[in-house]
Image (cartoon, rainbow, N blue to C red):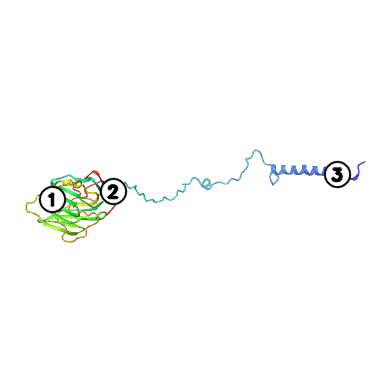
Amino acid sequence: GKNAVQVWEEWNMTTRKVLVVFTATALCFAVGCGIDGTFPDPDEPTSVMVDVPNDTLLGPQTPMLPEPQVQTVRPTPVDSYPRFAQITENGLLAVKGDPQIDAVLADSFTLELWAKFDAEGTQRIFGCEDMEINISGNWLEVVLDGTILETQAPAASEWYHIAVEVGNGKATLYVNGNPGRSEFLPELWQRPRGNLSFGGSGTAGVKGFSGLMDNIRLIHGTPYEGTFSPAATFESGDDLFGFSFDSGKGAEDMSGHGFDGVFIGEADTVPGSI
């Protein structure tokens, strides 16, 4: 009693079920057996393809280290060089008197320094017993036991080289290498001696130097004759003592004679050069 349409639909449905079962069986077979259709032996280890590093195959190897980089080690500067002394009217640089210094001052000597003044006006640059170097009004003067050498005072805010030579019965004041004034000294004049100070108040209430100093030297002898070119950098020669302030150790005597200076009050070294 089934018509042709019903017979056709039942046959079609049966065919589809067979195809589904066949396809599922085939997939299971492929997964379980492999492509060649052989079943794996459960007692044999399964081979697995794994990427193996070369060092595993070749044995232990020394690891490749990067090439060492050459580096220049620059130590952190403790101080800045060059340097000079900064002295206010309330400070000074002192050098303790010594028989060797007295002996040179009693013979022939040259005292020289570079100075930069904060302001114009009367002030004391250097002093010891029976010798002073001052700015007095408009004059730069050197006083040696009553003998006075004078020349035009330096302007403020500029570097000047000042030198005083004493020898052969004569004293000469130089400014920037130019002879400013010369005087013959009495035969029995009182020689400089005792403690030395750069800056500090002078006689008759003269206030102390205020500004910068550099390359201070006391030389045994009189090396300058006529006009000369002052060296802007420290040059050691026949110094009895010399201060360049560049060592970073305050007023260290660069001559090697051990006459170190001492800063007193408002005075110290600061970075800079002439």
Residue pushed farthest right? Answer: 1
Which residue in the protein does label 1 denote? 105
> In this rendering, does residue 260 appear at all?
no
Reading the image, the residue beneath label 3 is 9
**Left or right: where 37 falls relative to 54:** right
Q: Earlier in the sequence, mark 2 or mark 1?
A: 1
Disc 3 versus disc 1: nearer the observer:
1
Secondary structure beneath dot 3 equals helix
Q: Compute the Cα span from label 2 to label 1.
A: 30 Å
Q: Residues within 10 Å of mark 2 (few under 14, many from 20)?
A: some
Q: Where residue 267 sits in the image (x, y, percent)?
A: 25, 45
Sequence-first disc among 3 and 1: 3
Residue 1: quadrant of the picture: top right
Residues at badges 2 and 1 in contact (C-beta under 8 Å)?
no
Q: Amino acid at mark 3?
A: Glu
Residue extending furthest toward the left: 188
Could you say where residue 41 lies in the image, as x and y percent from the top left?
Answer: 66, 40
Q: Residue furthest bottom?
A: 227
Q: Which amino acid does the dot numbered 2 rest on?
A: Val
Judge by depth and name the residue closer to the eye, 254 or 153: 153
The quarter of the rendered structure image containing the C terminus is bottom left
